[in-house]
């Protein structure tokens, strides 16, 4: 598929292989949007950013810890400086209105993200379907596992949520 992309007589590649999409995603995560677009503009035989995004939308992620994202996240972190490895653990809560109601009573989604403190980056590492309120005690073990997994990647996490501080979740290296 990449050889076909170099062939100027072929206008589009009908279907990119899984390996090429994975390679493109890793490059996109490592280079960022601007860097990836520079590669495309330079003639590298890669799928468009929209194609990569569309293929990502078709991947089924189960609620919970997103371990599928960690190999790409690890590659992204290896390109960062130690200072860029300082991150904040954030909670994003969203109300949802499902078109097909399967999970009754679960009207919210809580996404756990890591965000860079010295540079701007964000990585979702966990998400859950929840009710309208957040209970820090129920999340304590999930958070500890998440912190340990992120530490293994080389992140140094800090929490911004006071309810989590009360549960003993603060800075990852010391708690």
Image (tube, grey):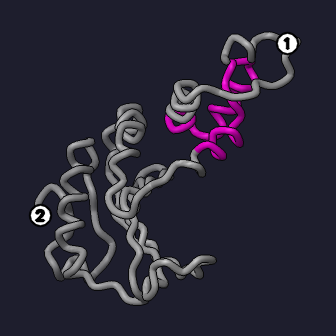
Q: Of helix, strand and loop, which one carries label 1?
A: loop
Neighbourhood count class around disc 2 (C-alpha, 10 Å): few under 14, some 14–19, many 20 upward: few
Assess whether residue 45 is covered by the magenta stretch: yes
Of the numbered discs in the image, which one, if any, rests on residue 74? Answer: none
Asked whether, in this view, residue 100 is left or right of residue 61, the answer is right
Q: Residue at x 34, y 44 (%)?
A: 83
Q: Which residues are magenta?
A: 28-55
Q: Main secondary structure of the magenta part?
A: helix
Alpha carbon distance from label 2 to label 1:
57 Å
Assess whether residue 157 is covered by the magenta stretch: no
Q: Residue at x 45, y 79 (%)?
A: 103
Q: Residue at x 86, y 22 (%)?
A: 11
Q: Is residue 42 above or below residue 27?
A: above
Q: Is residue 68 above or below residue 162?
A: above
Q: Is residue 94 above or below residue 31?
A: below
What x and y, as percent, mark residue 99? Answer: 63, 77
Q: Which residue is mark 2?
A: 175
Q: Residue at x 55, y 29 (%)?
A: 18
Asked whether, in this view, residue 74 is left or right of residue 20, the answer is left
Along the viewing direction, whichever of 156 and 97 lies nearer the viewer: 97
Residue 84 in view, yes or no:
no
What x and y, as percent, mark residue 74? Answer: 35, 37
Q: Of helix, strand and loop, which one carries label 2?
A: loop
Task: Give the position of the C terminus as an image quadrant.
Answer: bottom left
What x and y, as percent, mark residue 174? Answer: 11, 60
Q: Which residue is mark 1?
A: 8
Which numbered disc flags the more N-terminal residue, 2 or 1? 1
Asked whether, in this view, residue 59 is left or right of residue 84, the answer is right
Q: Nearer the viewer, mark 2 or mark 1?
A: 1
Neighbourhood count class around disc 1 (C-alpha, 10 Å): few under 14, some 14–19, many 20 upward: few
Residue 158 picture quarter? bottom left
């Amino acid at each position: 598929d990449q050889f076909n992309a170099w062939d100027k007589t072929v206008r589009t590649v009908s279907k990119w292989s899984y390996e090429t999409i994975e390679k493109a995603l890793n490059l996109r995560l490592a280079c960022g949007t601007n860097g990836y677009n520079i590669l495309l503009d330079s003639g590298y035989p890669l799928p468009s950013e929209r194609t990569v995004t569309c293929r990502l939308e078709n991947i089924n992620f189960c609620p919970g810890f997103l371990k599928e994202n960690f190999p790409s996240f690890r590659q992204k972190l290896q390109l960062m400086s130690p200072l860029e490895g300082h991150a904040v653990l954030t909670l994003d809560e969203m109300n949802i209105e499902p078109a097909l109601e399967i999970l009754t009573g679960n009207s919210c989604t809580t996404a756990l993200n890591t965000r860079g403190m010295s540079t701007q980056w964000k990585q979702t590492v966990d998400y859950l379907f929840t009710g309208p309120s957040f209970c820090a005690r129920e999340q304590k073990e999930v958070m500890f596992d998440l912190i340990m997994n992120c530490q293994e990647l080389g992140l140094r996490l800090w929490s911004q949520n006071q309810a989590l501080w009360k549960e003993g979740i603060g800075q990852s290296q010391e708690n």
